[in-house]
Image: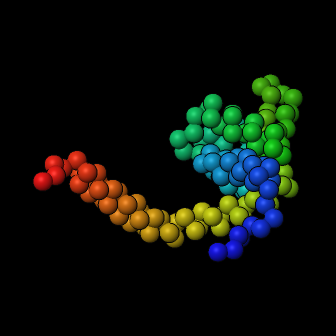
Amino acid sequence: MTDPFPDHRTSDCMRVSEVLARVGDKWSILVIGTLGDGPRRFSELKRAIDGISQRMLTLTLRGLERDGFVTRTVTPSIPPRVDYELTELGRSLLDPVKALGDWAIVNRDVVDAARQSFDAGRAESEAASLSPRH
């Protein structure tokens, strides 16, 4: 079998893994998708993303900002207005994130069936290993 990534180096793989970990986590995908519709205030993001805590939204936005996917704009007012928006880099993720989400929706039943089959086979194997032998 030929290596699909013949020129890969461990250091490059680690760097790619770091980026994929950022953009591939559940909350980052939801934040990126939500910001794909345009800039949002923190409270708007919190309302739009079901189940995210204030702390997790803060951490996710901070990580996305650090990695260059999101900009944070503070408008001096009382109280201060803070808006979040995708950068050009962040917008470039919209199509791949949507494609991955679409793929997951199309294949979720196949994945569920594979999990059930694996779990059933594993349970049978464990039961057989625990049964007394004659």
The residue closer to the viewer here, 3 or 65, is 3
x and y percent of residue 54 in the render? 62, 32
Q: Identify the image quadrant of the N terminus.
A: bottom right
On screen, residue 34 versus residue 38, left or right, reads left
Q: Residue at 57% x, 39% y: name it.
A: 52
Point 70% across, 70% down: residue: 3
In percent of width and height, residue 124 lies at 26, 57
* Residue 10 percent across, percent down from the top left: 76, 52
Residue 61 sits in quarter: top right
Task: Locate residue 5: give its quadrant.
Answer: bottom right
Q: Is 121 located above or below residue 11 in the figure?
A: below
Q: Which residue appears farthest toward the top when viewing the image?
A: 78
- Furthest-bottom residue in this view: 1
Q: What residue occupies the far front of the structure in this picture?
A: 134
Indicate the quadrant containing the C terminus: top left, top right, bottom left or bottom right.
bottom left
Residue 90 in percent (x, y) is at: 79, 53
Position above or below: 97 against 32: below
Q: Is 78 situated left or right of 24 in this image? A: right
Whether residue 72 appears in this view of the structure is yes
Between residue 81 and residue 52, name the one nearer to us.
52
